[in-house]
Amino acid sequence: MERSAGAGQAFTILEPNEGAAVAARPLLIRWTLVAGAVDYDVRIHDTSGSIVWQTHTSATSADATNSRVKAGQSYYASVVARLQDGKTVASSFAAFNIVRP
């Protein structure tokens, strides 16, 4: 059963876990379903806040394997849900590190 956040409520990035050390390939970002969401904007930010990868999806996961993340670097994932009424709900940031192969 998929966990769901109600419209206007915070939701959570499930993968990568906060503080996780993950491989760049494959790199999957998953989050909880937001009730009333039409779609999601998914981003990976570097430590300076610059967006290094982004996509748009109606699913609750995104394959970021083709992103330009680099081994040994730290990043933050974020997701913004766009709701049927035009409002948006943002996840908290999830910090993660890319491990060397």
Image (tube, rainbow, N blue to C red):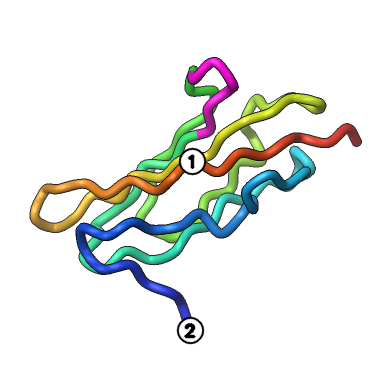
Q: Which image quarter: residue 42? A: top left
Q: Cα distance, mark 2 to mark 1?
A: 24 Å
Residue type at mark 2: give it: Met
Q: Dot 2: what SS?
A: loop
In the figure, is residue 7 to the left or right of 31?
A: left
Say which of 47 and 98 sits in front.
47
Q: How many marks?
A: 2
Contact between marks 2 and 1 (CB within 8 A): the answer is no
Residue at the left extreme of this rendering? 85
Residue 13, above or below 68: below
Placement of 72 over or under 30, stated as above or below: above
Q: Quadrant of residue 68?
A: top right
Residue placed under numbered mark 1 in the picture: 93
Seen as rendered, the residue at the extreme bottom is 1
Question: What residue do we see at 68% from left, 44% from top?
Answer: 19
Q: Is residue 44 above or below residue 27?
A: above
Residue drawn at 39 percent across, 50 percent down: 57
45 falls in the magenta region: yes
Location of the C terminus by quadrant is top right
Point out residue 84 in the picture as x, y percentages from the top left corner. Answer: 14, 58
Residue 16 is left or right of residue 38, and the answer is: right
Q: x, y (%) of residue 92?
A: 43, 45
Q: Residues within 10 Å of mark 1 (few under 14, many from 20)?
A: some
What secondary structure is marked by label 1? loop
**Residue drawn 77% across and 43% down?**
21
Q: Which residues are magenta?
A: 44-49
Q: Which residue is mark 2?
A: 1
Q: Residue 32: image x %, image y %?
A: 44, 64
Q: Earlier in the sequence, mark 2 or mark 1?
A: 2
Q: Does the magenta-highlighted stretch encompass residue 76? A: no
How far from the left and from the top, in percent, is residue 71?
A: 80, 27
